[in-house]
Structure formats: C-alpha cells, structure tokens
Amino acid sequence: MTTLPGYIIWDMQPEVFGLPIRWYGLMFAIGFLLGYEIVSRMFKHEGAPEKWVGILLIWCVLGTLLGARLGHVFFYEWDSYSQHPWEILKVWKGGLASHGGAIGVITGVLCFSYFTTRRSPLWTFDRVVIPIALVGAMIRMGNLMNSEIFGGPTDLPWGMWFVNSFEWRNVYPGIACHPTQIYEALCYLALFGLLMWLYWRKNAEARPGLIFGIFLVGIFLPRFFIEFIKNDQVAFEADMALNMGQWLSIPFVIAGIFFIIRAMRRPALHMTFPDAFPPEETGKNK
C-alpha cells in the first residue's frame, strides 16, 4: 500500500505474504475461531451445555458457505448457472452473497434449535449474531485484500486505486474509488461492540429477540446505504433503481424492527447466570 496526495494506491496481494493461503480465507477462519470462543463464553455464562458450542459452529459454517454460494447463484447469476450447473461447485472461482449467507445461518440455527437445544430459535439467534457481526467485518477486510467489492469514484483523501483489480484497471484507471469494504467493516465492528455491551452489561438477552433485531438493522441498514456508492456486482443491476443487495436488505431491516418492537413490548425474563458449564450428564435435553 502506497499513500500519495489525494488517494491511496492499494496494491496488496490476495495471498498471505506469498504463501498458498488467501487473506479472504484466513479472515473467514479467524472470524469463526473468535466467534467460537465468544459463544463458548456466553454458553458457559448461562450454564448451557458445552457440547452445544461445537454443534452450533458446524451448523453456522455449513449454513454460511452453502447459503452464500447458493445466494450468489440464485440472486445474481442464475441465467448463467442454470445453463452450467456444474459451475456451482467451483467455489474457488468466487461468488458468495452475504444475503444468502444470512439465510443459510438462519436455516442452520433453526436446525440447531430443533435437533439440539429444543429451545426457541430466538435464544440462539440472540447469542450467535454477536460474533457473526465480527465475522462480517473480517470477511469485508478479506474483500479489501482481494481488491474486490469497492465503490465508485471519489475525491476524498482515503480514496483508493485498486491496482490489482481487473475491474478497476478497465473501468476506473487513474481514478480513486471508495473503499466500501472498509466502510462496511467499520459499521460491523461498531455493531459488534454494541451487541457485546448489550449482552454483557445490559443483559439484553433477557428480552428475547432484542439483540437479534438490533443485529438485523445494524447489518443491513448500513449495507443498504453503502450500496448507493458501491459498484454493481452484476450487469443487470445497472437498470435498477435499487440494486439487488438493497432489495434483499429491506426484508431483513423490516424483520429487525419487528423483533425490536416485539422484545421491548414484552416483560424481561428473569435469568440466572451460573458461569459454569453443566456436568455432562445434566446437559442432555429432557
């Protein structure tokens, strides 16, 4: 990375210091490892079985990967993939959609709640979305290292030349563009801090759905507005008043507002916090 008056030349390589490891995958993995530790501490704080943490991680990883891939296929490039369905399996060529990932995680949590906890899915959502906000920030930083998903031209001093991007070299040569990956990452980090504060300091988990609702609004409302300065992901978006990412964000924001209102209108639960995992034999569902 080189800083010059008026803009920044972003020339980071997608590989980690020349190793056969990509920053995107590394950021993704670090996010989930940190998420595992955060969820583990919350489950221990509330006396939930320790084995639930690993099971939930599996559901979330599978839901994220499958949902993000299929979301890209169906939301953005179905015309192409419907003609070449075997290309769906070639995830190394890129093509993941965050809205599809969100749907995948929701599906995974529903399965986890039905098969494992036998509790309301809101119990899991209110806890798992906290580290997911951090994972979202890490993924956007991975996008930055890949020089992808950036914005349109800007004369702001932090505008960037994405010199390793084929798109930038062909569409915006010599023009600084918005580093929208950083904008989103900062929003998600701020949301992560807010949710951690609400859980550990304000016991917001005593109002089922509140943390989940704030997460939905905090993730998808900034995404909606940042999309106005972000480049279109696929050609058909050029003729849309709102792009696909914005249309897909609206239902999540509405759902978030619903859960916030619902949670605040209901009395808070009385909760105890044993700060210990239960013995293995008492951790079974009754």
Image: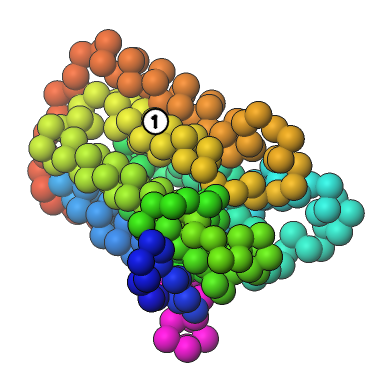
The magenta region covers 14-27
Query: In x, y percent, where is residue 186?
Result: 32, 50
Query: In x, y percent, where is residue 75?
Result: 69, 42
Main SS class of the magenta portion in the image: loop
Query: In x, y percent, where is residue 234?
Result: 70, 49
Q: Is residue 73 left or right of residue 79?
A: left
Q: Is residue 152 left or right of residue 183?
A: right
- Residue furthest toward the top? 265
- Residue type for callout 1: Val
Q: Is residue 42 left or right of residue 72?
A: left
Which residue corresponds to the image point at 20% horizontal and 30% vertical from the top-left? Answer: 204
Residue 22 sits inside the magenta stretch: yes
Which residue corresponds to the image point at 49% horizontal and 59% vertical from the top-left? Answer: 176
Q: Nearer the viewer, residue 75 or 33?
A: 75
Quadrant the N terminus occupies: bottom left
Q: Is residue 226 visible?
A: yes
Q: Is residue 8 above or below residue 53?
A: below
Q: Label 1 crowding class (10 Å Cα cut-off): few <14, some 14-19, many 20+? A: many
Which residue corresponds to the image point at 41% horizontal and 63% vertical from the top-left? Answer: 7
Label 1 SS: helix
Query: In x, y percent, where is residue 262?
Result: 34, 15
- Residue furthest toward the front? 5
Please name the residue that numbered disc 1 is placed on: 217
Q: Is residue 57 above or below residue 91?
A: above
- Residue furthest toward the right? 83
